[in-house]
Image: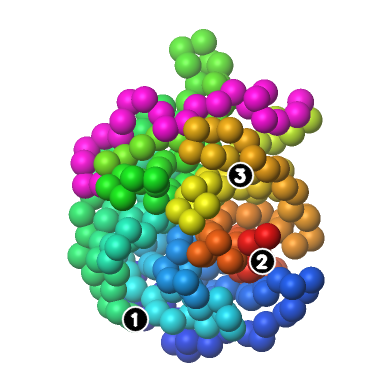
């Protein structure tokens, strides 16, 4: 697919809507199915969709697209479910655990990439990627475990660690918690983690479940610190989360055939 057909021609989005201290922006056409967020700078985030390896940098003050660059020529296609930034590189992960690494590109640039198999795919369906407490690792978020030989699905929150540029993640999960430890009986059936972010400022791990609109805060040992609810009207399907310097929380919601994707920015506390 041609890059010009996928990247935005104009770099300005629609007007900002201020609601209860939040900033809300419609995302560009290429992000109707936004699938992940990562911190790009203190004032911007990286975002991507779930079909093409195109990374958009979006400024949070007015919602402008600062740049968009693509991995590969032609543009890499896949089922992309998460993004992370470490230094001058970005990483995209697919639902079956392939991780694509590339240098951050300029606007409309095509960049070379490398690919690694995290080895997590056989154990769970993957739905998120994040920086971690260790600079040389990323965190891989499982949406749900694969069914075992008896057809039973493990009902746990599981996060794996992957050493950057290696093959296969650590076999021992970074966190593995039974859902009964932090969710009510009514919350558990619809719990499908859809976004993750490690906040180095607070040392906290943020996880969002778009399906039942729950946002969770854990410490690095897996202790639940806070549980928050997202409103259905403002957050119909949250797919990405990013914490910026302890000041802002950015949430990305997937669009529909009649509604564009949305980026919402809240004060952190």
Looking at the image, is 243 positioned above or below residue 63? Answer: above
Q: Is residue 187 above or below residue 19?
A: above
Tag 1 and tag 3, C-beta contact below 8 Å: no
Rendered location of residue 181, percent (x, y): 65, 25
Q: Is residue 234 in sight in this rendering?
A: yes
Q: 124 left or right of 4?
A: right
Q: Which numbered tag is attached to residue 217?
A: 3
Q: Of marks 2 and 1, which one's residue comes earlier in the chain?
A: 1
Res 40 label: none
Q: How is the image coloured?
A: rainbow
Q: CA distance from mark 1 to mark 3?
A: 34 Å
Front: mark 2 or 1? 2
Q: Can residue 255 be seen by looking at this rendering? A: no
The residue most toward the front is 202
The quarter of the image holding the C terminus is bottom right
Q: Give the crowd class for mark 1: few <14, some 14-19, many >=20 residues within 10 Å.
A: some
Q: Look at 48% across and 89% down and name the residue there.
A: 10
Instruction: Say which residue label 2 marks.
Output: 266
Q: Secondary structure at mark 1?
A: loop
Q: Which residues are magenta?
A: 164-185
Judge whether residue 54 is colored magenta.
Answer: no
Image quarter where the N terminus lies is bottom left
In terms of depth relative to the viewer, which is nearer, 75 or 22? 22
Mark toward the start of the polypeptide (1 vs 3): 1
Say whether residue 168 is magenta: yes
Q: Residue 113 at x, y = what percent? A: 22, 60
Q: Distance from label 2 to label 3 (Cα)?
A: 16 Å
Q: Residue at x 72, y 47 (%)?
A: 228
Q: For mark 1, what is the residue?
A: 107
Evaluate if marks 2 and 3 touch, with contact meaning CB atoms under 8 Å apart. no
Badge count: 3
Q: Which of the two marks, 1 or 3, is nearer to us in this view?
A: 3
């Amino acid at each position: 697919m041609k890059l010009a057909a996928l990247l935005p021609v104009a770099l300005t989005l629609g007007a900002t809507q201020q609601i209860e201290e939040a900033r809300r922006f419609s995302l560009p056409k290429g992000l109707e199915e936004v699938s992940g967020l990562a911190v790009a700078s203190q004032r911007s985030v990286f975002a991507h969709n779930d079909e093409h390896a195109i990374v958009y940098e979006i400024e949070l003050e007015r919602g402008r697209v600062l740049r968009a660059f693509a991995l590969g020529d032609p543009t890499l296609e896949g089922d992309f479910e998460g993004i992370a930034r470490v230094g001058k590189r970005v990483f995209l992960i697919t639902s079956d655990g392939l991780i694509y690494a590339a240098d951050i590109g300029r606007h409309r640039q095509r960049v070379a990439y490398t690919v690694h198999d995290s080895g997590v795919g056989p154990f769970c369906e993957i739905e998120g990627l994040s920086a971690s407490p260790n600079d040389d690792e990323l965190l891989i978020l499982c949406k749900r475990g694969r069914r075992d030989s008896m057809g039973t699905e493990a009902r746990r929150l599981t996060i794996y660690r992957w050493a950057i540029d290696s093959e296969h993640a650590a076999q021992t999960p970074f966190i593995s918690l039974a859902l009964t430890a932090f969710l009510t009986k009514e919350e558990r059936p619809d719990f499908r983690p859809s976004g993750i972010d490690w906040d180095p400022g607070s040392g906290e791990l943020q996880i969002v479940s778009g399906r039942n609109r729950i946002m969770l805060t854990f410490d690095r040992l897996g202790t639940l610190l806070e549980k928050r609810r997202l409103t259905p009207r403002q957050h119909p399907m949250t797919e990405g989360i990013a914490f910026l310097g302890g000041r802002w929380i950015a949430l990305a919601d997937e669009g529909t055939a009649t509604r564009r994707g949305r980026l919402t920015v809240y004060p952190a506390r």
